[in-house]
Image: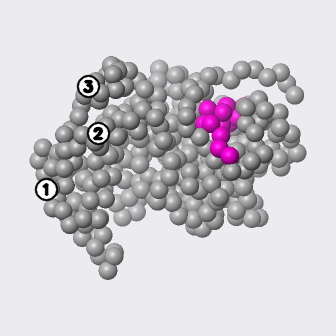
């Protein structure tokens, strides 16, 4: 084995991932008859207990080390290797796009060249955008083969994480249908993708707000240089729902409602400077505005679905100065007005 060189540092985190993601990641190596024991040891991962969990920084280190060892950023899972440097080229090709729609189109064309076993497409469907990932050739004879499962898990995570980074905010996935049976580690999907995950589809379909496609790309070459430190494994640590500072800010915002806190208010309660809070949220792949919007969105959807409260009352409880501001925000989130959303829910229940 060639001499091991240190990997770029990845910030430590208390977040963990299920062992199922590790065994899936190693599937390509094992198909090739490679010894994975030394790789696991170098990453500080002990795989004996399938129910144990792995610190996410160690998982990210294993991710990058496997890429380098195999010279394949797709872990030896496909008929052709995706050579190291492919992710960097993808980033450089998308960072100059005018908006997310064009960035995803460029991504689809790029992956058609370097990852021909899978197809990636973006389509619009009834006010939603859908990211569709399907096989152009069977990845395994068994739909639930760990390598096949991980191939879809990995590519969705890669594309979603990159999209979030490009536009500078977390992009909520409304739902995802995965093309295999529910895996043992599927509880982690709520942390990584969305709580609304379904299984046994024909292809992978990730649904999100169609308005996201119009978001401008906010990154440049200077930001890209920093982003690529520790990438692509670094993406595993970003845009998750179990991030420490994100959760602290979200909890403070929720507890203060209907008062609408500012970034300065939050920083004061955390005994930090606003700059420090902003930087730590950025390190975790989020922002104060994104957290505030997501909290209000989640609470608004729940209230409309589960209560008979008036729209004016919900708007006031969520800290909106007037109902019209809540109305505009809700249309941005869902593409429809609050009253229409509630009527549609009622119709679906009947």
Q: Position of residue 346 (x, y in %)?
A: 28, 73
Q: Position of residue 144 (x, y in %)?
A: 70, 62
Could you tell me which quadrant the N terminus lies in? top right
Where 218 falls versus 29 (above or below)?
above
On the image, numbered disc 3 is attached to which residue?
264
Q: Residue at x 65, y 44 (%)?
A: 53
Where 130 falls versus 158 (above or below)?
below
Q: Secondary structure at mark 2?
A: helix
Q: Nearer the viewer, residue 11 or 208?
A: 11
| Category of crowding for the residue at label 1, using alpha-carbon neighbours closer than 10 angstroms: few (below 14), some (14–19), many (at least 20) | some
Label located before the other in sequence (3 or 2): 2
Left or right placement of residue 306 versus residue 217 in this view: left
On the image, numbered disc 2 is attached to which residue?
253
Label located before the other in sequence (1 or 2): 2
Q: Find the distance from the CA under tag 1 to the CA under tag 2.
A: 20 Å
- Residue 62 lies in the magenta-colored region: yes
Residue 98 in view here: no
Left or right placement of residue 341 versus residue 79 in this view: left
Magenta span: 52-65
Q: Nearer the viewer, residue 325 or 204?
A: 325
């Amino acid at each position: 084995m060639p001499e091991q060189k240190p990997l770029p540092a990845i910030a430590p985190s208390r977040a963990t991932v299920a062992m199922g993601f590790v065994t899936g990641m190693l599937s390509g190596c094992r198909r090739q008859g490679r010894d994975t024991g030394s790789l696991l040891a170098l990453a500080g991962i002990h795989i004996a207990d399938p129910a144990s969990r792995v610190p996410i920084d160690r998982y990210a280190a294993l991710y990058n080390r496997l890429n380098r060892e195999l010279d394949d950023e797709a872990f030896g899972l496909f008929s052709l290797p995706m050579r190291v440097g492919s992710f960097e080229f993808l980033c450089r090709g998308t960072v100059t796009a005018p908006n997310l729609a064009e960035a995803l189109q460029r991504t689809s064309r790029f992956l058609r060249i370097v990852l021909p076993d899978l197809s990636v497409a973006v389509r619009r469907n009834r006010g939603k955008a859908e990211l569709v990932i399907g096989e152009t050739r069977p990845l395994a004879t068994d739909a639930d083969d760990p390598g096949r499962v991980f191939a879809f898990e990995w590519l969705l995570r890669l594309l979603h994480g990159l999209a979030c980074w490009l536009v500078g905010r977390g992009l909520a996935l409304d739902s995802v249908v995965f093309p295999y049976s529910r895996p043992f580690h599927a509880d982690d999907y709520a942390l990584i993708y969305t709580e609304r995950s379904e299984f046994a589809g024909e292809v992978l379909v990730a649904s999100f707000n169609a308005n996201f496609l119009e978001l401008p790309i906010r990154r440049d070459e200077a930001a890209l240089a920093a982003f690529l430190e520790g990438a692509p494994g670094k993406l595993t640590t970003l845009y998750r729902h179990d991030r420490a500072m994100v959760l602290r800010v979200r909890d403070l915002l929720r507890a203060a409602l209907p008062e609408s806190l500012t970034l300065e208010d939050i920083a004061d309660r955390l005994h930090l400077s606003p700059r420090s809070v902003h930087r730590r949220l950025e390190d975790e792949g989020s922002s104060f505005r994104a957290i505030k919007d997501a909290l209000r969105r989640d609470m608004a959807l729940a209230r409309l679905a589960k209560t008979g409260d008036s729209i004016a009352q919900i708007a006031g409880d969520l800290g909106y100065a007037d109902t019209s501001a809540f109305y505009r925000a809700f249309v941005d989130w869902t593409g429809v007005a609050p009253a229409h959303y509630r009527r549609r829910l009622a119709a679906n229940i009947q």
